[in-house]
């Protein structure tokens, strides 16, 4: 175990957990504050999660939505980026413990901002993850890209009509914005991009099924927009099945229970889970120490100023916190991160802090297909081409850096004005790497990547030395 380098000049130490929207925008807001910032990220990149489905369907590359955190903060002299997964937070000792590949580091703090986000929730059925990847990380998107494009390749080789049907059936679970956008892009991929690329199969015959136990698609939206989205999905060939609860998932298909209690099976090689989120387990850890309530989704109840009860030096923002039923969207994290950073700067300067966080709702949007989207913004609800253009502009604005914005526009032009998709590469490593690593366990990961070795460490399962 190592201890992080102490602050130089005895300036207040601010530790930020998470490099997502909340953590990154908090760090940037502290650029001119007389503090030393340590941002601890589980990955080396900042992920623009709303566009993950475009990586999975070959429109964008992973680099365009996941710029390196170090590059973003390279000109911020008071900020230091550390790679590691936070495994412990001690509110009494004011320390944060992070680990990466067997290396453990303890970071002392004077002010703490926790923005660790949320992961996929399978509602107590974590075994579904083996066959139905979620949509929360770059690894997820690349795995899904390989599975989606690979399904068409395997169908071209198959001779049994039933096997071809299974391979060309794609099931998306969850009819929220992520599920709707994913289902729409798979349908467009099959009917536009790939329609002339194969000789033995007809990609346009692929079935794309969108499932949800809810009674409508896009539940957060008003009924008018939900119905508009439902109609557009049907027009591009997506089968929307509502009131259908998933009861089992395996390698060959999925079992659903309809509202009348009848169970049925859908044979499908590719299943995508876009339903439900579970906050970082750090929420439970903080709740146990502070006495704050933690809900079923793992979100911790915070004070009106986003601080923990009895700990004004600790702020929780984004998907981890529960306050006034705020939605789990990027804007909540961005505004919360900035608010927490301003509170830290005020405390350091001896100024009074704002007593309450007020969220400014800029609205919600979801794209259904090329040239079609729905938008609920500033008391206006509308859909169609104008909503789609607005969706493009808003998402482009929140891309980090000119380079990423420029390349995104180019790839959007290729995909939406033409038929092509430049990011169609899928490898076995992407498709099977997650399952292989889970099977081998963490000891393999440490032994193969130069992780810190300890006496009595388990023998490398491959019997080979790292390069």
Image (cartoon, rainbow, N blue to C red):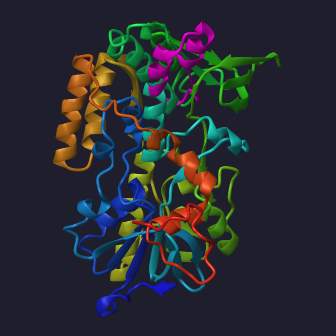
Q: Quadrant of residue 132?
A: top right
Of residues 441 and 401, the one nearer the viewer is: 441
Query: What percent of the width, then of the height, locates residue 230?
Result: 51, 15
**Drawn side of residue 16 relative to residue 122, left or right:** left
Q: Is residue 5 above or below residue 411?
A: below
Q: Quadrant of residue 59?
A: top left
Point 69% across, 45% down: residue: 126
What residue occupies the far bottom of the structure in this picture? 9
Point 28% across, 43% down: residue: 64
Of residues 228 and 268, the one nearer the viewer is: 268
**Residue 317 drawn in magenta:** no
Query: What percent of the width, then of the height, locates residue 191?
Result: 39, 11
Q: Is residue 169 above or below residue 125?
A: above
**Residue 164 drawn in magenta:** yes
Point 62% across, 35% down: residue: 131
What residue occupies the far front of the structure in this picture? 463
**Drawn side of residue 9 relative to residue 275, left or right:** left
Is any part of residue 200 visible from this angle?
yes
Q: Residues in magenta?
A: 150-177
Q: Is residue 285 above or below residue 269?
A: below
**Drawn side of residue 76 relative to residue 434, left or right:** left
Of residues 60 and 101, the one nearer the viewer is: 101
Point 41% across, 55% down: residue: 20
Is any part of residue 323 visible from this angle?
no
Query: What percent of the width, then of the height, locates residue 99?
Result: 51, 72
Of residues 39 and 410, the one nearer the viewer is: 410
Tell how many labels.
Answer: 0
Query: What percent of the width, then of the height, locates residue 144?
Result: 48, 34
Point out the image quarter for the C terminus: bottom left
């Amino acid at each position: 175990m190592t201890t992080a380098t102490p602050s130089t000049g005895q300036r207040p130490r601010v530790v930020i957990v998470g490099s997502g929207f909340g953590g990154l925008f908090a760090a940037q807001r502290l650029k001119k504050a007389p503090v030393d910032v340590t941002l601890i990220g589980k990955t080396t990149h900042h992920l623009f999660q709303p566009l993950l489905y475009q990586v999975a369907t070959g429109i964008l590359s992973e680099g365009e939505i996941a710029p390196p955190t170090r590059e973003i903060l390279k000109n911020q002299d008071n900020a230091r980026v550390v790679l590691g997964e936070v495994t412990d937070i001690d509110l009494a000792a004011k320390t944060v413990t992070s680990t990466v590949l067997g290396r453990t580091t303890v970071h002392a703090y004077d002010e703490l901002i926790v923005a660790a986000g949320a992961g996929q929730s399978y509602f107590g059925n974590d075994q579904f993850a083996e066959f139905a990847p979620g949509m929360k990380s770059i690894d997820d998107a690349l795995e899904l890209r390989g599975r989606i494009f690979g399904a068409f390749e395997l169908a071209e080789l198959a001779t049994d009509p039933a096997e071809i049907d299974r391979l060309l059936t794609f099931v998306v679970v969850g009819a929220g914005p992520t599920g709707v956008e994913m289902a729409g892009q798979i349908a467009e991929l099959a009917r536009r991009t790939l329609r002339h690329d194969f000789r033995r199969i007809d990609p346009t015959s692929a079935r794309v099924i969108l499932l949800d136990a809810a009674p409508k698609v896009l539940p957060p939206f008003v009924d008018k927009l939900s119905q508009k989205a439902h109609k557009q999905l049907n027009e591009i060939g997506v089968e929307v099945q509502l009131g259908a609860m998933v009861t089992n998932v395996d390698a060959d298909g999925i079992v659903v229970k309809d509202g009348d209690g009848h169970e049925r099976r859908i044979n499908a090689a590719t299943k995508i889970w876009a339903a439900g989120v579970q906050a970082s387990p750090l929420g439970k850890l903080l709740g146990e120490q502070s006495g704050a309530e933690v809900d079923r989704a793992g979100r911790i109840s915070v004070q009106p100023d986003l601080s923990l009860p009895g700990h004004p030096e600790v702020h929780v923002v984004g998907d981890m916190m529960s306050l006034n039923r705020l939605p789990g969207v990027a804007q909540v994290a961005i505004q919360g991160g900035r608010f927490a950073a301003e509170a830290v700067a005020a405390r350091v300067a001896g100024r009074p802090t704002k007593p309450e966080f007020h969220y400014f709702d800029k609205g919600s949007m979801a794209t259904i297909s090329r040239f079609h989207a729905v938008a609920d913004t500033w008391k206006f609800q509308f859909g169609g081409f104008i909503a789609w253009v607005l969706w493009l502009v808003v998402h482009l604005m929140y891309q980090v850096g000119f380079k990423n914005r420029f390349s995104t526009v180019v790839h959007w032009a290729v995909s939406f004005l033409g038929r092509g998709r430049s990011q169609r590469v899928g490898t076995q490593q992407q498709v099977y790497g997650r399952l292989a690593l889970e099977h081998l366990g963490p000891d393999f990961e440490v032994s193969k990547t130069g992780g810190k070795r300890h006496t009595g460490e388990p023998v490398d399962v491959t019997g080979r030395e790292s390069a």
